[in-house]
Amino acid sequence: MNLKQMVGIEAATHVKSGMVVGLGTGSTAYYMVEEVGRRIKEEGLNIVGVTTSKATEAQALALGIPLKSIDDVTHVDLTIDGADEISADFQGIKGGGAALLFEKIVATYSNKNIWIVDESKLVVKLGQFPLPVEVIPYGSTQLLNLFATKEMAPTLRRKENGDIVKTDSQNYIIDLQLDQIDSPKELGTWLSSLPGVVEHGLFLDVVNTVIVGRENGPETIQ
Ligand code: 5RP
């Protein structure tokens, strides 16, 4: 079993019948969703899922997980999601899979958030992983220029075939190579203030539980 699978299965043990569960996106969350689907089929687990991307929605539907939109639930009890980087003080970068907007909305309305990662994602300070910023297409070249003048090494995210990546909301992603983020809150506030920026991948004060996949087993850090 690989580390992502290990933490996905461990995280699914936090899911209890009666819960509304936010289902994250990415290759680690994938295993959690599979395990929730298995428990529904084999153990009679009874939950409602709220997905954070079209990809997770397709996976959950194929597994027979009952789903509702974030707009059709009163609250989300627990969201389990992956992350791209987690600092020592539990701040995170997400959006490597371009799902940051829905992920942040679902996380914001969740009573509890758990992140599941392999140990390579734990860092002292955020910033080695390029910070994703979701922007609307109109004005995106101006934003790229602005970020370049601030030496943020922006790149417009493209697929291998050169096509521009579009998010589930048909927006673009600009990745900022910052190397080290000294003041994540200040940076997040500035990014949010820019016209055309829909959301950024700094997930601040979102989680208090992280499940880390280590060679000798999953470790829950709180
Ligand atoms: C998608 C995300 C993912 O949760 C993040 O990229 C981690 O993905 P993976 O588990 O595949 O490494 O934020 O937008």
Image (cartoon, rainbow, N blue to C red):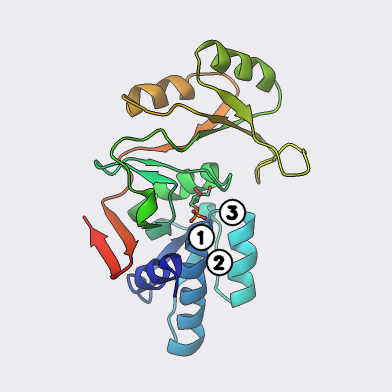
Q: State the CA–CA distance, disc 2 to disc 1.
A: 6 Å
Residue drawn at the location 35% of the way across and 28% of the way down: 184
Residue drawn at the location 40% of the way across and 58% of the way down: 79
Q: Amino acid at mark 2?
A: Leu
- Residue located farthest toward the front when viewing the structure as drawn: 215
- In primary-sequence order, the first of circles 3 and 2 is 3
- In primary-sequence order, the first of circles 2 and 1 is 1
Q: Amino acid at mark 1?
A: Val
> Looking at the image, do the residues carrying marks 2 and 1 touch, with CB atoms under 8 Å apart?
yes
Q: Nearer the viewer, mark 3 or mark 2?
A: 3
Disc marking residue 50: 1
Q: Which residue is mark 3?
A: 53
Query: Crowdedness of circle 1 by 10 Å Cα count: few (<14), some, many (20+)?
Result: many
Q: Which residue is mark 2?
A: 67
Find numbered disc 1 in the image and state the secondary structure of the residue it sits on.
Answer: strand
| Position of residue 200 in the picture relative to residue 180 (left or right) | right
Image position, residue 76 (x, y; %): 40, 58
Residue drawn at the location 47% of the way across and 24% of the way down: 192
